[in-house]
Image (cartoon, helix red, strand yellow):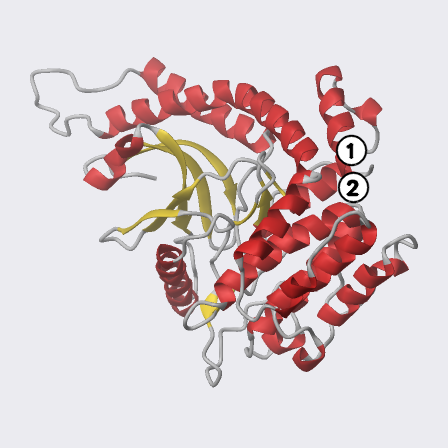
């Protein structure tokens, strides 16, 4: 996993594996150059039978690093570092985003109500506006609940830019799709900014119903939930239109539609008509409106999520400490004197090796059982058992479930 003689690897201490996927492995690590702060190290999968596939994977991996370097938005995971070894290993270091993916929230607690879906949708639109306003525009191409994190502070964060690309109108893109969330044009290698809006519609539909969207099927949420707000239902239908021309023109148009829907659900909430006439994106007045909407209901979820995060850190503490011990022992073993004629005995005893192996195995077992906090790959996620009843939970988790359900389903 690491080369102890390389200065770059001495900077990071690998603690535990968070997940694996088609494009790589995700590790939780500590950065010694930043006060041992937590970070995530993404290692590109080196096991590709086809040289062309590996070449394409390396290209996408390097492009992800290049894109993240240029981005600065609270809704985009922060880039820290990247590194490539002489023997062809590639690493990407990013911020460790605490929280849960929207897919995990759906799996654990069920579908979102209309009010909370609108709040999440507004935040997603703001990030898409930022990406699409870059020069040239950046198409995310993989918008789905598993790639969106909800932090304890109530912030939505995009965490995986593995297949994002800059938009060149006459250039064909690599055909990378996620069934259910990718629009028809993406299957033909012709994504554009409105392709992300299709995925936004599929994501909103998934949040509202808890039902994963079917490939290339523009089903409306009302087919699964009769009480969904009619205008929210219509918005999903428009967003998932097969033709890009039939979708809203921009993410800003979608955000304004969500503003109006929120206003319809909350008659006391006033939005000046001038806001909808502004031509420039993200005016201060619009930012204030978005923040006011978020504060009206995200606090309860954020508080519950913070409590869950505290419990999670306690559950993982033993695993992380074990991971540190295993890492240090294995590094010491890797630094042993290779000269057998040395007067000193550099070898680690068999009991020490067994102890390191036991610690490593325990760390991996604990890691696989813990609640994953980072998307493991572009299209493959760690599955979660679905809770069917409060009775299924241990007593100490019932309080958290009651709090978060009161927010998601009030």
Give the SS element for disc 2: loop
Rendered position, 169 above or below 73: below
Q: Earlier in the sequence, mark 1 or mark 2?
A: 2
Which mark, by number, is residue 110?
A: 2
361 vs 352: above or below: below
- Residue 228, percent from left and from top: 86, 54
* Left or right: where 118 falls relative to 40: right
Q: Which mark is residue 405?
A: 1
Residue 372 position by quadrant: top right
**Residue 216 visible at all:** no
Between 142 and 363, which is closer to the camera in this rendering?
Answer: 142
Asked if the residues shown at circle 1 and circle 2 are in contact, with their CB atoms under 8 angstroms apart, the answer is yes
Q: Nearer the viewer, residue 251 or 219?
A: 251
**Lateral position of residue 331 relative to residue 281, left or right:** left
Q: How many marks?
A: 2
- Residue shown at 43%/59% (left/top)? 48
């Amino acid at each position: 996993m690491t080369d102890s003689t390389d200065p770059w690897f001495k900077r990071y201490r690998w603690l535990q594996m968070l997940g694996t996927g088609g494009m790589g492995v995700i590790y939780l690590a500590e950065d010694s150059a930043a006060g041992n702060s937590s970070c995530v190290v993404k290692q590109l999968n080196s096991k590709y039978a086809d040289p062309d596939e590996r070449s394409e994977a390396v290209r996408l991996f390097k492009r992800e690093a290049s894109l993240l370097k240029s981005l600065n938005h609270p809704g985009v995971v922060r880039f820290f570092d990247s590194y490539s070894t002489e023997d062809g290993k590639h690493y990407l270091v990013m911020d460790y985003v605490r929280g849960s993916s929207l897919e995990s929230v759906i799996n654990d607690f069920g579908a979102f109500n209309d009010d909370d879906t609108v709040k999440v949708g507004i935040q997603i639109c703001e990030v898409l506006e930022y990406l699409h306003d870059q020069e040239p525009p950046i198409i995310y191409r993989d918008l789905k609940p598993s790639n969106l994190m909800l932090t304890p502070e109530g912030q939505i964060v995009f965490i995986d830019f593995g297949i994002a690309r800059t938009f060149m109108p006459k250039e064909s893109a690599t055909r990378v799709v996620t069934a259910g969330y990718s629009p028809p044009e993406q299957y033909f290698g012709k994504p554009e900014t409105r392709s992300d809006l299709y995925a936004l519609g599929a994501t909103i539909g998934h949040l509202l119903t808890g039902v994963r969207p079917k490939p290339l099927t523009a089903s409306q949420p009302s087919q699964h939930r009769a009480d969904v707000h009619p205008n929210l239902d219509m918005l999903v239908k428009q967003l998932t239109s097969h033709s890009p021309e039939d979708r809203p023109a921009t993410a800003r148009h979608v955000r304004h539609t969500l503003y109006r829907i929120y206003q319809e659900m909350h008659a006391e909430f006033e939005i000046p008509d001038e806001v909808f006439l502004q031509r420039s994106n993200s005016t201060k007045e619009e930012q204030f409106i978005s923040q006011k909407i978020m504060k009206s209901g995200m606090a309860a979820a954020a508080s519950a999520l913070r409590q869950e995060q505290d419990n999670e850190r306690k559950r993982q503490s033993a695993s992380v400490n074990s991971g540190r011990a295993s890492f240090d022992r294995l590094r010491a073993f890797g630094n042993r004197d290779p000269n057998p004629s040395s007067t000193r005995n550099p070898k680690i005893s068999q009991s020490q090796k067994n102890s390191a192996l036991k610690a490593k195995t325990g760390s991996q077992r604990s890691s696989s059982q813990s609640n994953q906090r980072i998307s493991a790959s572009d299209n493959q996620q760690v599955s979660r058992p679905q809770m069917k009843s409060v009775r299924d939970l241990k007593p100490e988790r019932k309080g958290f479930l009651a709090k978060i359900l009161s927010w998601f389903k009030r």
